[in-house]
Amino acid sequence: MRPTLDFSPLFRSSIGFDRMLNALEAANRVEPFNNWPPYDIVKSGEDDYRITMAVAGFALDDLTITQEQNLLTVAGERDGADEGQYLHRGIAERAFRQRFQLADHVKVAGASLVNGLLTIDLKREIPEEMKPRRIEITAEEAMPANQVKQIEASKQAA
């Protein structure tokens, strides 16, 4: 059994770390590792990623892909039973649900099913206001010495 951690004391004593603590709580709630169907995750560019899942036997209508905030869910469920008596059954047809935690600003760019491989393309799109920008430095002319204002105090004898 996996121990559960309580992060509530950290919420009381930290400011501005809400998202990090929420990510830690989400990682703590991760379901047991399921290695079916097999999949690959590839970084195909600076801001591009690809998930490829082997879903042999599943048709387009049997698969659903949903994205809610930072969670991508891929599910597959086949309808109907095959006719016939199997002497050997090596092709898995069981339903599945795979969840992938996405970083901020990662969106699904597209998905395709070719030759039993489901390919999901992801792209990180950082909003313009969050991208680094160059700040122009301007040079101000110094004031002439005769225009420099000084504070003068009168001297008083004690």
Image (tube, rainbow, N blue to C red):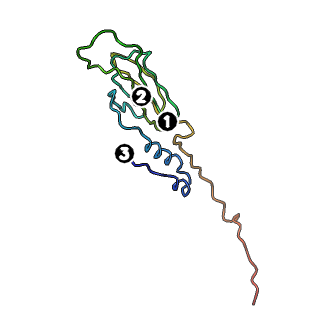
- Give the image quarter of residue 150: bottom right
Please name the residue that numbered disc 1 is placed on: 70
Labelled disc at residue 12: none
| Residue found at x 57% / y 39% | 129
For label 2, the SS is: strand
Nearer the N terminus, badge 3 or badge 1?
3
Q: CA distance from mark 1 to mark 2?
A: 16 Å
Q: Residue tagged by mark 2?
A: 97
Residue at x 49% of width, y 38% of height:
104
Label 3 and label 1: CA atoms lie apart by 27 Å
Residue mark closest to the camera, 2 vs 3: 3
At x 49%, y 35%, the residue is 70
Q: Residue furthest bottom?
A: 158
Q: Secondary structure at mark 1?
A: loop
Tell me which label, 1 or 2, sits earlier in the chain: 1
Q: Which residue is mark 3?
A: 1
Element marked by disc 3: loop
